[in-house]
Image: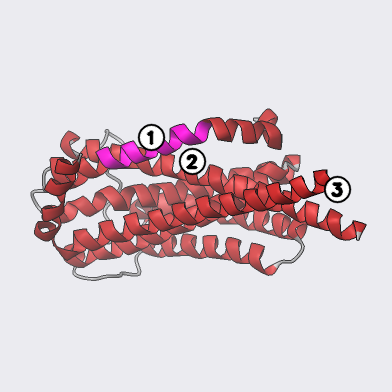
Amino acid sequence: MHKFANPVRFNRLANTLLPWTFALTVTLFAAGLYYALYASPPDYQQGDSVRIMYVHVPASSLSLAIYVFMAAASAAFIIWKHPLAVLAAKAAAPIGMVFCGLALATGSIWGKPMWGTWWQWDARLTSMLVLFFLYLGYLALWQVMEDSNKAAKISSILALVGVVNIPIIKFSVEWWNTLHQPSSLIREGGSAIDPSMMTPLLLMLAAYGLYFVTVLLWRMKAEMAEKRLELALREKASWS
Amino acid sequence: MVMMLLNILPSFERYGEFVWSSYSLSLGALAILAILSWRKKIVLEKRLEKITVKKSKT
């Protein structure tokens, strides 16, 4: 892991990976959407509304996973002072925030026909909303602080403190009596989802995951270019 | 591929506004984020290239 903290090596690796991750993301989205909208059956109780699951579950799972990734990258920055680690966390935050926003929005849209309400202040929904605000707060810290070293330190601390919310989101449906259903994908005794619905769900999960990798690499390369640009401009200003 | 897409499209009407709005919102947001991220990378890399070329000339 440490050898990829070198920006030149990282750039070389990203340039090799990007065409493959991009092509795979498009292919998986095409296959996933075909299964989600066409090849999978409607649910016996929910009817065609169950198809919302194929965009809602990947968005919410990835928004949790991205936050854990950000916390791990922030920890690497605090412990080893790797500048690439904090760039990775910073680049991942907008993607995580969009996924979290989508999970909340599609969950709300799914809730209306299923529960009869757009929103309920139950433990799962509220803790997801807290996660959205953590993402927002993390990005706001980078925006308001002029000193990027200070912003990196403080935002890393926020990412590490906020990770406490992840197990709360995951186990909220077991610890409290919630309107949101308990976990049906990863649970004791195996998954409760029929294989005909599992195929599109896994395809969409893989598509969302690879989408994250592709966009993260783009954003990290952009962040690195911005840093080098800042340095070049500062150097130029010191000459003149 | 085109036939497959054409087969899927009418089902939006059958699935109703909840499914339709979830998919269009999700795919739209993901497409916008991807385009903005890719564009940011291209613009910054080009600007950096310009500055480095200028610097090496001087």
Report crowding for label 2: few under 14, some 14 to 19, many 20 or more residues within 10 A (C-alpha): many
| SS type, badge 1 | helix
Give the residue pinned by disc 3.
Answer: B58
Label 2: which secondary element: helix
Instruction: Inspect this view and state whether residue A168 appears.
Output: no
Q: Secondary structure at mark 3?
A: loop
Furthest-front residue in view? B57
Q: Which mark is residue B33?
A: none
Residue A111 in the image: x percent, y percent?
Answer: 24, 64
Depicted A9 relative to depicted A212: above or below: above
Q: Amino acid at mark 3?
A: Thr
Give the prevailing secondary structure in the magenta stretch. helix
Residue drawn at (68%, 41%), measured in percent from left and top? A76
The one nearer the camera, A68 or A122, is A68
State left or right for residue A77 relative to residue B41. right
What is the basis of the colouring in this image? secondary structure
**Whether label 3 touches label 1, CB < 8 Å:** no
Query: For the point 25% across and 64% down, which residue is it?
Result: A109
- Position of A213 compared to A73: left or right? left
Residue A80 lies in quadrant: top right
Considering the image in quadrants, where does the N terminus of chain B appear?
Answer: top left
Mark sitting on residue A24: 1
What is the three-letter code of the residue carrying label 2? Val
**In the rendered image, residues at marks 3 and 2 fall on the same chain:** no
Chain holding disc 1: A
Question: From where the camera sits, is residue A225 visible?
Answer: yes
Residue under label 2, please give it: A213
